[in-house]
Amino acid sequence: MKRRLHPLAIVRIAVSTLFTTMFAAAFLGLGGAAPARAIASLQLFPGAIRLIGTGAATVFLVTLGVSTLFGRVYCSTFCPLGAMQDATAALGRKRSGAPYSYARGRPLLKAAVFAAAAAALTLGAGSYAAFVDPYSLSGRFFQYAARPAARALASLAAWLARAAGSRWRIGDEPIVAAAALAATVPIVLVLAAAALRGRPFCNTLCPVGAVLGALNRVAPLRVRLDAGKCTSCGACARVCKARCIDAEHKALDEDRCVSCFTCLSACPTGALSYGAGKPTGRRAPRGPIDTSRRSFLAKAAAGGAATAIALVLRPISSSAEAAIGPIAPLAPAAPPGAGSMERFLSTCVGCGLCAASCPSRVIQPSISRYGLRGLFAPFLDYDVSYCQYECSACLDACPTGALRGMGLPDKKLVQMGTAALVREKCIVITDKTACGACAEHCPTGAVRMRASPSGIPEPVFDEAICIGCGACHHICPAEPIKAITVTGKSIQGTASAPTKNLFSANGPDSAVGSGTAPDDFPF
Amino acid sequence: MDRREFFRTMTHYGLGAAWLLWGGRDTFAQEARTRAPDLVAVKGGGPDALFDAGIAALGGMKAFVHRGQTVVVKPNIGWDQPPETAANTNPSLVKRIVEHCLDAGARKVYVFDNSCDSWSLCYKSSMIERYAKEAGAEVVPANASGYFQEVSFPGARTLKKARVHELVIESDVFINVPVLKHHSGAGMTASMKNLMGVVWDRQFFHRNDLHQCIADACLYRKPDLNVIDAYRIMKTGGPRGYQSSSYDDAEFQILSADIVAADAAAARTMGFEPSRFGYIVKAAAAGSGQADISRLDVRRISL
């Protein structure tokens, strides 16, 4: 018999589908910047970092307020990983046909993971905590794994469309296989668990789920079980993917209820409802949150251990950074608005939204450039492209504030790195043929061509107005070693405004025309 | 044959002869009038008005585009810069050229460039994408290596083989629409330098004698028509343009089927002798066109 869905469940599925589609589209590069930013800024984990780092509280508090009022609806609507788990779980159920059944919660594990994540966040190692953040996990999966796959499919479609006269082709983009793999593994694990057990990730590892679960206990509006009406038939428990309804004891573990509303239409007696003020079910014996001293001590110990781990990891990552410094030929440059490397790596969750927004694809995920702590943190890969001067898409998109938002005029002065010109490698010097590719691409005039005795213009460099965008580095044709390269700055600076006249009569650029065109025809 | 018949016959012959004579003369006159100049220079108007006058002097777009043909229009869309910086070809000019092509009966008009800055930004901020689409062109990107197929450049000294955009390979008519600018590497960019944007690997040019490669680049397929946009000329700080770049609002345009002649005229427009630019000298020596403007039939038009 086909069970009808409760209207609230239909609304939940519609909202969740809409949000997740928009989320995926944004990360796949199909959606506009505005919806991507809106969806990302609603997410609680990056919101918490934004709050700690910049004090921007509005959206975070609104989202939290909604959860306080309406229960744990966030997990079944706004959370992309929640939606992906629900879809996988539904498929898993359809295949196995086995009903869900009540399972006891794992409050100790949840508390420990939450404490570790909270410690990492407050101690400035948000990137570690992001390994259990559903938003970051989903974002980087879509950006670094699903996007290349989607583009491969689109390429196939484009190839087929050419038969019908289409000129559409999919542009070249680098694929970082290690990032694709590292982004896929956690998602596969989470979804596999969902296919077997419903929502285990959300009630054990997810730090957002931990907070929202606690709030769901006090929310005025939430799913409630009326023990008076309950006949312990277990119909609800068989459809509950959070596995939080103990029908035998007529008890609902509200902490773990993700407000999916599936149980509402399953209950034959109307004992389950969503609303305010109705009597709640009894406490299940040995309920998930017990206030015993033993439990408190265990949680405190777990929190302490997590803090210790976070403290240990910090020096490790710092030393890893120090270690790669002198060995790596060039320090990586972070995208504009990163501020200091320390601040950046503390607040970046590696979600990949900046990379998704970047029109030139110069933003690539770090696998080893920043060390373990900066896994998935973005860096500017000048072998791929260069930072576009008139663009601020990445820092506009960043949901954590790791890339500090600022106006385009300010962004144009951010020094992400510094170029270094090695004349001995320059084509003009070595081959005595004209080049100027660096000066051609430089947006500020920091590298420009100056007439030389040989008659071939040679590049000169002015560090004060160099912003480290990497245009010169990217385009320099010298092989095998480029004549001009950009090294990232550990603390981003501010360049002088490139307003001074670079082309005065005595200026460096004497390759300028002798005058303006004559009044009459010049030939 | 009686007298009447004789007169009738003579009248017929006479009329026929007269018709032949006058008609023939008329035909010759027409021919003299449509023998197009080698180069047209137009000044004093908007980019579209300059083109209207220039193409008319060349016999109209029908002299280049026949009914049912495909046309590729290749402007300079190299930089993420707005039209007023004249870093890219003027969008109104591109629009007008597309309109002329379609009026002449073109089946399809394509517009593309292999941009330097990120292509999506360049296509947008140059406004060429919008204007070309408004005129009815299909705007095609050049961001996928799959668009480019390897061809050989017969007679080339350095650029013997390169991957060229499929639209240049496949289209019936090739119209090159550069913007005239100072260029830090090549000295000046006009028609020949603009052909770097039909090739995938532009770094090869810089690595292997830039001037020789630019001259070689005309040896695969010379454009059927070059339209040099000199409405606003970036005199310094090209090709991208800096905040302190200087400009000449010349309201000028050069049209020629001879790519070398067009660039020689462009050099003069910038205030230089054509011989100053290595690629003009090399291309003329290779027989790609006439660099000596005094040997050209030039039509000068002031609006």
Image: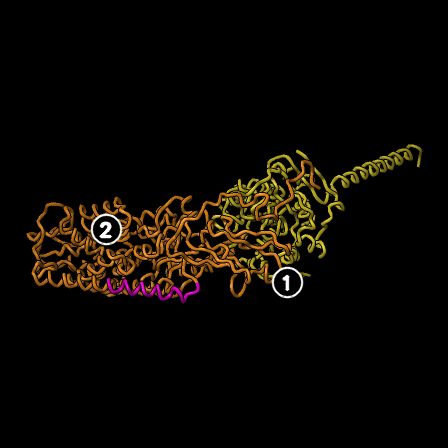
Chain colours: A orange, B yellow
Q: Is residue A177 left or right of residue A62?
A: right
Image location (x, y in percent) of residue B67: 63, 46
**In this orientation, does residue A8 appear?**
yes
Residue under mark 2: which chain is it in?
A
**Residue A313, which numbered label?**
none
Q: Which residue is tagged 2?
A: A74
Tell me whether the residue at label 1 lies in contact with that at label 2, contact meaning CB atoms closer than 8 angstroms.
no
Q: Amino acid at mark 1?
A: Lys
Look at the numbered disc 2 and give the secondary structure of its residue: helix
Q: Check the picture and name the quadrant holding the C terminus of chain A.
A: top right
Image location (x, y in percent) of residue B30: 76, 39
Q: Give the foreground label among 1 and 2.
A: 1
Q: Is residue A138 above or below residue B252?
A: below
Depth check: A497 or B215 in front? A497
Q: Is residue B157 left or right of residue A154?
A: right
Depth check: A43 or B151 in front? A43
Q: Amino acid at mark 2?
A: Tyr
Q: Which residue is tagged 1?
A: B160
Image location (x, y in percent) of residue B197: 57, 53
What distance separates the C-alpha of mark 1 from that of mark 2?
62 Å
Q: Residues within 10 Å of mark 1 (few under 14, many from 20)?
A: some
What secondary structure prevails in the magenta region?
helix
Image location (x, y in percent) of residue A219: 15, 48
Q: Which residues are magenta?
A: A311-329
- Is residue A319 highlighted in magenta? yes
Q: Is residue A342 left or right of residue A209?
A: right
Look at the numbered disc 1 and give the secondary structure of its residue: loop
